[in-house]
Image (cartoon, grey):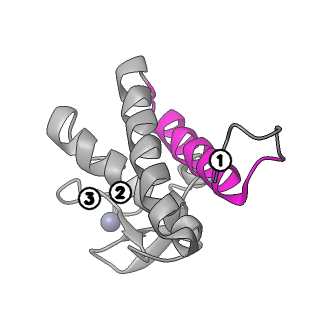
């Protein structure tokens, strides 16, 4: 598309990217790791996924899950496991996985006990449940 034309409404792709960014940031805030350096990892991922979704427009439904995974990978190198599983109280701390890896409506899943923990973007609303 030629962006030099008159301004047009925000495209579905931009909406999806904006939503993905907001969801992943919400989860970072929930994990108290939303530092400037880490927020810039999100920006980086969103920029890459913009390019990716421009090549494959149907993929715009998947960007939230992909950005979450990108940030998770980037954090693993620089920061450590994120997000830590809030469900398994004991044993080795482990990170949640995004499922589906490539699909709409991504969730954080504990791979150890195979439980959906929260939708991507909703980690902050589930972390308080400590009773089992
Ligand atoms: Zn777990």
Q: Give the mark, 2 or 1, whose residue is nearer the N terminus.
A: 1
> Which residues lie in the magenta part?
9-34
Dominant secondary structure of the residues highlighted in magenta in the image: helix
**How far, Cα to Cα, is label 2 from label 3?**
25 Å
Q: Residue at x 82, y 38 (%)?
A: 7
Q: Nearer the viewer, mark 2 or mark 1?
A: 1
Q: Mark 2 points at which residue?
A: 69
Of 82 and 129, the residue lying toward us: 82
Q: Is residue 77 above or below residue 20?
A: above
Q: Which residue is drawn at 40% across and 27% down?
A: 40
**How far, Cα to Cα, is label 2 from label 1?**
30 Å
Q: Can you give x and y, in whole percent of width and height, for residue 130 in the image?
A: 50, 55
Q: Which of marks 2 and 3 is in front?
A: 2
The quarter in which the N terminus is drawn is bottom right
Few, some or many C-alpha atoms within 10 Å of disc 2 (few <14, some 14-19, many ≥20)? some
Of 82 and 93, the residue lying toward us: 82
**How far, Cα to Cα, is label 1 from label 3?**
54 Å
| Magenta stretch holds residue 23 | yes
| Magenta stretch holds residue 77 | no
Q: Residue 2 carries which label?
A: 1
Q: Residue at x 47, y 38 (%)?
A: 28
Q: Residue 90 carries which label?
A: 3
Q: Is residue 48 visible?
A: yes
- Give the structural element (helix, strand or loop) at label 2: helix
Ligand 1 is found in which quarter of the picture? bottom left
- Which residue appears farthest toward the top when viewing the image? 36
Few, some or many C-alpha atoms within 10 Å of disc 1 (few <14, some 14-19, many ≥20)? few
């Amino acid at each position: 598309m030629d962006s030099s034309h008159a301004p047009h409404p925000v495209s579905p792709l931009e909406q999806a990217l904006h939503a993905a960014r907001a969801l992943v940031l919400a989860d970072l805030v929930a994990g108290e790791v939303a530092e400037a350096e880490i927020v810039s990892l999100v920006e980086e991922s969103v920029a890459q996924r913009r390019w990716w979704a421009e090549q494959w427009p149907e993929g715009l439904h998947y960007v939230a899950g992909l950005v979450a995974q990108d940030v998770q990978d980037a954090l693993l190198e620089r920061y450590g496991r994120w997000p830590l599983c809030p469900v398994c109280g004991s044993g080795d701390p482990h990170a949640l996985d995004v499922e589906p890896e490539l699909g709409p409506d991504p969730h954080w899943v504990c791979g150890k006990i195979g439980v959906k923990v929260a939708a991507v973007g909703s980690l902050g609303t589930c972390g308080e449940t400590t009773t089992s």
